[in-house]
Image (spheres, helix red, strand yellow):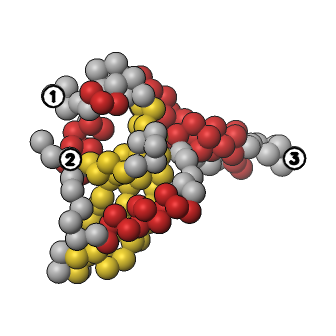
Amino acid sequence: MGIGLRVFLINDDNSLQPLAVKRYNRLLRLDSRECLPLYAGKRVRYALVVVDFADRKPVEIIQIQYAILNFDSDGRIDAGEQEKEWLLAVDSLPPVDNEKLPQPVIDARHHFAQKRYQDKYRWHPGPELEAAIVAAIFESNATKLTR
């Protein structure tokens, strides 16, 4: 058994576009040679699926994350937007040292940051789309975008 990832870009019509994990990683690393011109200038929903495999066949979906990728005008990940996302993710972490605050004071800034993060960089599929993603994982002839 082994753990693997599958990535699906979700088009505006809710169709799934498989994306090779290597290509996804190059996009996130802001590799200048990697781009998806079809998505230039768009905010694109995607699903990152963590799958348990046995004999190279999927046996269980462990987790699915639903997030947004922001592309620049060349079809690369928008570096400025990526930085904003990371900063907001850090702001979402609970404070490390709440003990220094006076007792009646509650530091809820991280709760508000979590809400902003969820609203801006996450999404939730309907049951039909989620079923399509699950079905795509267990199809034996799933195609991938490769380079």
* Left or right, 82 with reference to 77: right
At x 74%, y 43%, the residue is: 107
Q: Give, as a three-letter code, the residue at label 2.
A: Leu
At x 47%, y 66%, the residue is: 131
Query: Who comes first in sequence, dot 1 or dot 2?
Result: 1
At x 53%, y 45%, the residue is: 122
Query: Which label sits in the foreground, 1 or 2?
Result: 2
Q: Secondary structure at mark 1?
A: loop
* Left or right, 81 with reference to 23: right
**Position of residue 52 measured from the top left corner of the image (x, y, whole percent):** 31, 74
Residue 96 visible in the displayed image? no
**Position of residue 70 measured from the top left corner of the image (x, y, whole percent):** 42, 31
Q: Which mark is residue 104?
A: 3
Determine the CA span between mark 3 and mark 2: 54 Å
Q: Give, as a three-letter code, the residue at label 3.
A: Pro
Q: Quadrant of residue 50?
A: bottom left
Residue position for label 1: 33
Query: In front here: 25 or 55?
Result: 55
Q: Which mark is residue 145?
A: 2
Query: In front here: 141 or 9?
Result: 141
Q: Which mark is residue 147?
A: none
At x 57%, y 36%, the residue is: 120
Query: Which label sits in the foreground, 3 or 1?
Result: 1
Q: Secondary structure at mark 3?
A: loop
Neighbour class for label 2 at 10 Å: few (<14), some, many (≥20)?
few
Residue 60 vertical position relative to residue 105 in the rendered view, above or below: below
* Left or right, 12 with reference to 22: right
